[in-house]
Amino acid sequence: MSRHPSVSVLIPAFRPGWLDVAVASALAQTHTDLEILVSDDSAGTAVESVMAKWVDPRVRYFRNPQRGEPGANRNHLIAQAEGQYLKFLFDDDFLLPRSVELLVQAVRESGAKLAFHARHLVDEHGKTLASPSIIEAGTIAALPPTFLFEKLVADCANPIGEPTNILVDAAALRGMREPFALEGRRMRFLTDVTLYTNFAAAGHVIAGVGYFGSAFRQHGSQTSGAQYAGFSAGYYEWELLRRWAADTGRITHERFARGNAKQLGLYRQWASLFPELDAFIALEGAAEDGLHLGPLFLEALSLADATIEMRKLSRLH
């Protein structure tokens, strides 16, 4: 391995259960000029015990110095990485062998600053549940920023998928002040979608690869499930992104309005469990004096964020 590898694979770890599979899948990549960084955000020693068995010069293990702080483990990995490109890999997911190879090929051929491939959705045993893809098999498609705003933000949908599916240019990522936040506002759930939105807002082309290069594991203990205290943010943050995009001219007001029915349907599906969504339902997507990010929406947003924080505290006691 060269002193500065072309790719840094970043594994923010706190669960030991599938970590061996994740590390093994990174080491099995056909693109071998890489380093694998594992940052431990757990309170105990289980993750450290798993990593102790991996003796490979490409693997580096360390503990997160700001354990438990939102985003700190991810940010620590980014700060430690030496590669030209950063490849995320969550500790319960895994990569297929050509993942890194084809993503690097995609960014180099297209000039994109972020690339993604398709992924399989698997259960806790690795059984395939679904295999969605928006890119034709065997092809690389350069997607302009307008495509991302239309198909991602305006539609409240994530065709790119989770961070395990992506590779980003390290310099482009570090050139953004807060790439996982929306103009300084912390995101509690849609950090990945916000990252993609920020890349599109910066004018960067995003490349899609028609190859199934990873597996996203769905299981009962994942933090993105309905048991997560901040689950409701996974719905109202879509409206925040949509309103911001409309106010900044990245989608039209008419396109915003067409998305309101879907947004309200998502809210109503979960409002009985997460009553903070009622305030957004009451707004019905309305603008205030032509401004989408108006006082009433921002008040509902602040109340919802505060509700999530209180829910987290109540579950600690």
Image (cartoon, grey):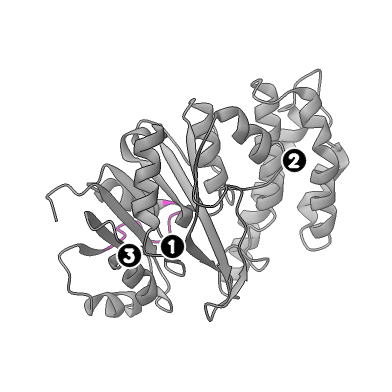
Q: Which residues are magenta?
A: 62-71
Q: Amino acid at mark 2?
A: Ala
Measured as percent of width and height from the top left, residue 220 is found at: 60, 76
Q: Amino acid at mark 3?
A: Ala
Q: Is residue 184 visible?
A: no
Up the image or down, 103 lies above or below 109; here it is below
> Which residue has dot 3 on it?
26
Asked whether disc 3 touches disc 2, contact meaning CB atoms under 8 Å apart, the reply is: no
> Which residue has dot 1 on it?
90
> Which residue has dot 2 on it?
300
Residue lying at 33% horizontally and 69% vertically, measured from the top left:
23
Residue lying at 79% horizontally and 59% vertically, measured from the top left:
270
Of residues 199 and 302, the one nearer the viewer is 199
Q: Amino acid at mark 1?
A: Phe
Is 64 magenta? The answer is yes
Other-residue count near label 1 (Cα within 10 Å), few / some / many at <14 / 14–19 / ≥20: many
Dot 1 or dot 3, earlier in sequence: 3
The C terminus, quarter of image:
bottom right
Dot 1 or dot 2, earlier in sequence: 1
